[in-house]
Image (cartoon, grey):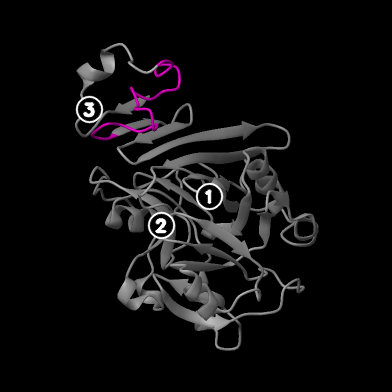
Amino acid sequence: MIRRYLGLLTALLLLLPAVRAGAEEDGFPALNDAGFLDSGEFVWEDEENGVWRYASETLRIEIFRREQKKPARVWFEAEVFCAEGSTGPRMIANDPENWRKSANMEYPHKIARKNGTVLAVSSDFAQLRLQQKKSKPGIIIRNGEILSDRTKKRNGTDFPTLDCLAIWPDGDMKVYYSDELTAEEYLDAGAADVLAFGPILIRDGKLNEEALDKYGTSHAQRTAVGMAEKGHYWFMMLEGRIQRSKGDGIRFLAEKLFEKGCTIGFNLDGGDTSCIVFMGHQLCKLQNGKKNKPSRRTSDILGVGTSDLLPAVKDPW
């Protein structure tokens, strides 16, 4: 087990009796009434038992690796709380000035390290569709800039559906069908980022049963994000196509998000794009054996939180 207590928190502080009732049991040091630290940062990494935690003055994250034997599945559940007025989940580019160019793509864990991102998952892999002139990329907006306004009609036969996840600067998130709004309408509504992939998993607190039966039914790696309410989010990633985890269809994570109380849920790009990264380290496995491989290079990640504590380490990838 590896424990790292960084920032203004010290080992001495962590040895003192917890001020907040139950603080020792839930794995965090004493938190204030809002559920955050008064100052500093707290980082806990226990890869052996599959538990990771982070806390600061504006952010609290708890990640659990879940395992199931029959059928073999391994998945990660990350619960995220953001303080009111702080920055929630957002799209983080490897190279904002050259977003479309394949030469400027990078592994997600390296994008996280470059930007000091605490938690991240894969996004919509939109740059691939933008490079294919004959395809419709979907409605793509990054940091208030329209990269594509070409989408397809809802409820088509192709996967991905190009449904949209819209993210506002105040941390609000909403899901829309592929052609429900135009790119300009998203900007008029104040959305900063719009991802196109899908399908919608949960909308208005209800599972999208029609889409769950129709799309993404094969067993594969999956990534999804959900919001219970503004400031309270769930990031999930399911490993697949390896011995310890055969993967599943999109319904698997949709039902997990629903069980957690998410009122919206959205399917992100899966397969070799699928990943989850904490403090600059990829947590998931994408191949069998002792050596792991990184997920696919991409132009951006969906992340939350920033920290100066991320390691600037070299690895073989």
> Mark 3 or mark 2: which comes first in sequence?
3
Residue 286 tag number: 1
> Mark 1 or mark 2: which comes first in sequence?
2
Q: Secondary structure at mark 1?
A: loop
Q: Amino acid at mark 2?
A: Pro
| Above or below 258: residue 109 | below
**Few, some or many residues within 10 Å of mark 1 (<14, 14–19, 20+):** many
| Above or below 2: residue 312 | below
**Few, some or many residues within 10 Å of mark 3 (<14, 14–19, 20+):** some
Q: Nearer the viewer, mark 3 or mark 2?
A: 3
Judging depth in this view, the residue of 246 and 124 nearest the camera is 124
- 261 to the left or right of 279: right
From which residue to which does the magenta span run?
21-41
- In percent of width and height, residue 63 lies at 48, 36
Q: What residue is shown with label 2?
A: 108
- 207 to the left or right of 66: right
